[in-house]
Amino acid sequence: MEDPRFAEIQPDYVFAFHNLPGYPLNQVVIKDGSFTAAVKSIIIKFYGKTSHAAEPEHGENPAISIAEILTKSKALSNNNPERKDFAVITPIHIEMGEIYYGISAGYGELRLTLRTWTEEEMEILKTKLLQIIKETSSRNSIKTEVDWTQEFMANQNDPESVAMIRDAALSENLSVKVQTHPFKWGEDFGLFTQQYKGAMFGIGAGENTPALHNPDYDFPDEILPVGVQLFYKIALNISHK
C-alpha cells in the first residue's frame, strides 16, 4: 500500500477471500461490519537489578511485575464473541533471568497478543493495559519499555460490497452462510478495508478438516476456481453499475 504505483490505482472496491476449515466445502461465508479481529502484539521489557538469590532485597526482580500484569490483563479479557466489547489478551512468551539458582533475575520480557472486534475497542484495551504496566512498574521500582509488533487492522466489511459477494455466490448456485460474529484471528487485508470500500469473505474448506494453522491442515485446491469465479462475477457486476 506504500508503493507509489498502488497509489495511482486508487481502487473503487477491494475484495479478498480466506479458506475456512470447519465449513462445508465451497460454502461462501459473509458478514457485514467486522469480519476479522483487530490484533496487536506487545513486547514489554523489564529492567530491574540482578542480585544474589539469597539476598533478593538488594536487587529488583521483574517477576512480581510480570505476574501482576498477567493477572490484571486476564481480568481485562472478555472472550465472548457474541459481545461487542469482545477482548482477549493472550500470554505468548515470557523470558526472565538465567538458569543459575544463586542469581535473582534483573531482566525480563513479556509478550502478549490483544484482540478486539474494532479499532476503537482496541484503543480502549491498549490504554487500559498500558496504565496497568505503568502502575505496576512504578510500584515495584522496575523500568519498562514497550514495543508493538504484528499489528493487524480489523477487516471492516462494507455492506454494499458484502451484497455483491452474496449476489455473485447465489448466481453460481453456491451455499451462502451469514456469519453472526467476526473471526477471532487477524488478517492483513484489514489494512485495505480500513481505507477502501470492500469486503473479505470465506470459502468453506470442508467440515471434517483440521483447523487453520494446524500442522495437519491441507489447503483444498478445489476451492480456488470458486474464488476466481466469484471475483469475476463481482467485477462484472461492478462494471455494469
Image: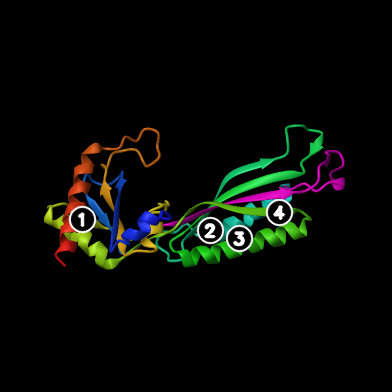
Position of 61 with respect to 44 (left or right) is right
Give the foreground label among 3 and 4: 4
Give the foreground label among 2 and 4: 4
- Determine which residue is flagged by label 2: 77
Label whose residue precedes the other's in the sequence (1 or 2):
2
- Determine which residue is flagged by label 4: 144
On the question of residue 181 being in view, the answer is no
SS class, disc 2:
loop
Question: Which disc, if any, is residue 129?
Answer: 3
| Residue drawn at 68 percent across, 53 percent down | 145
Q: Position of residue 241 (x, y in %)?
A: 16, 67
Question: Which disc, if any, is residue 176?
Answer: 1
Tell me whether the residue at label 1 lies in contact with that at label 3, contact meaning CB atoms closer than 8 angstroms: no
Give the foreground label among 1 and 4: 4
Q: Position of residue 231 (x, y in %)?
A: 21, 53
Query: What amino acid type is highlighted by mark number 4?
Result: Thr
The part of the chain drawn in magenta is 33-62
Label whose residue precedes the other's in the sequence (1 or 4):
4
Query: What amino acid type is highlighted by mark number 3?
Result: Leu
Tell me whether the residue at label 2 lies in contact with that at label 4, contact meaning CB atoms closer than 8 angstroms: no
SS class, disc 3:
helix
SS class, disc 1:
strand
Tell me whether the residue at label 3 lies in contact with that at label 2, contact meaning CB atoms closer than 8 angstroms: no
Label whose residue precedes the other's in the sequence (2 or 4):
2
| Residue drawn at 46 percent across, 64 percent down | 119
Dot 2: within a 10 Å radius of its alpha carbon, few (fewer than 14), some, or many (20 or more) residues? some
How far is the residue under mark 3 from the one under mark 4? 13 Å
